[in-house]
Amino acid sequence: MVLVRGKDIYYQVYESSANFSNSESSANSFADKTKNLVLLHGFMGSTLDWNPLVNFLLAQLSGPLKIISILLPGHTQEVSNSLKNNISTGDFSKIQNLVNSSNNSLSKLAQQVLEIQKKEEALDCHYLGYSMGGRLATELANLNPRTETLILESSFTHWENKEAQNLKKKEDCFLLKPLLSLTDNFKKEEKIGSESKDDLLHKNFKSFLLNWYNLNLFKGLDQNKNFSLLLKTRMQQNVKHLHEALQAYSSSTVNSYLDVLKKLHCPVFYIYGDTDTKYKAIGLNLKKIISSVNLQEIKNASHNTHFQQALHFNQTLLNILKLNS
């Protein structure tokens, strides 16, 4: 694994180039040339979200594979200051990508990711995007004629009407405002009662996250044995930067991706959880409109299928990559 600082974006690169005989190649490898997979996480996530998938694919695929995992602007994650065999041997520090004038829309951000792919010689690729990352993946597939597969997990495709789009814009504008007010109204050194502002912000952000993941959209997620680890990574985020990302990359900034999806020449896969009624309906409706879309339902999962049912999700991705090579 290599952590790379692009022009404005941190990203991680994982590579496997196992040597094997011709017989092993025909039996185990799904291609001779390097396969490139670009991973795009969701809102409040990081490249760490994809670690189980990355480890699974590197173990299961015997052919050369390059995985590029993008840290979306407005997001933060911890990285080890010292790695040996990909295992932390030292302290951690935070890295973050900021929203700025060069990436403050999905289309601009897609251009930046394409520049990364050119640098990494990875334009022939499969895109996998979850939720917010799915919107970026769709933008990328539209711009990159060398896209081999577009894989969307629980991602927006189109609005039923303008009213729904406007409502979403208002919701996203105010979602983090109560937390932002703590930052705006108090200086860093001041205390509110017996608590420092930072302590209060931390407590309120944790409360926000617990309420967020208690939404029906994420049904059952907080019962997962690894939920505390997910919560820990989310707590690393900067609320102000998350707000900026949400304004820049909200689904309300997009009218529809139907025309884009209709004209794509690559296979399109839509993955959803069987208990996520909202995005299951989006997937089923998309299939009615574009019959070539491949639907993949993950059982006993809601919105975040790659977290709730990692083994099933990982195997689904492996099958998709093998079938579309």
Image: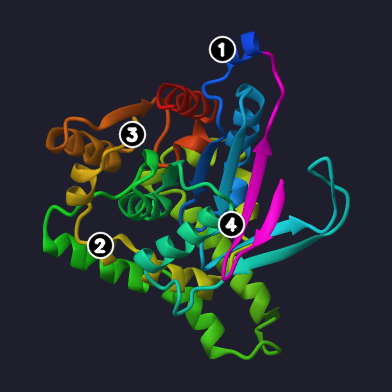
Looking at the image, tell me whether mark 3 or mark 4 is earlier in sequence order. Answer: 4
Nearest to viewer (mark 3 / mark 4): 3
Is residue 225 in view?
no
Q: Position of residue 226 (x, y in %)?
A: 62, 38
Q: Amino acid at mark 2?
A: Val
Disc 3 target residue:
269
Disc 3 packing (10 Å; few <14; some 14–19; many ≥20): some
Q: Position of residue 251 (x, y in %)?
A: 30, 60
Q: Secondary structure at mark 3?
A: strand
Disc 4 target residue:
234
| Marks 2/4: CA–CA distance | 26 Å
Q: Position of residue 9 (x, y in %)?
A: 57, 65
Looking at the image, tell me whether mark 2 or mark 4 is earlier in sequence order. Answer: 4
Disc 1 target residue:
26
Nearest to viewer (mark 2 / mark 1): 1
Q: Amino acid at mark 1?
A: Ser
Residue nearest the observer in this picture, 192 or 19:
19
| Marks 2/1: CA–CA distance | 43 Å
Q: Which region shows up in magenta?
A: 1-21
Disc 4 packing (10 Å; few <14; some 14–19; many ≥20): many
Q: Quadrant of the C terminus?
A: top left
| Marks 1/3: CA–CA distance | 26 Å
Is there a contact, CB below 8 Å, between mark 3 and mark 4?
A: no
Is there a contact, CB below 8 Å, between mark 2 and mark 4?
A: no
| Marks 4/1: CA–CA distance | 42 Å
Q: Which residue is found at the position 33% from the left and 50% from the top? A: 138
Residue nearest the observer in this picture, 194 or 115:
115
Q: Which residue is found at the position 73% from the left and 57% from the top? A: 79
Disc 2 target residue:
254
Disc 2 packing (10 Å; few <14; some 14–19; many ≥20): some
Is residue 212 depicted above or below 224 in this figure?
A: below
Q: Quadrant of the N terminus?
A: top right
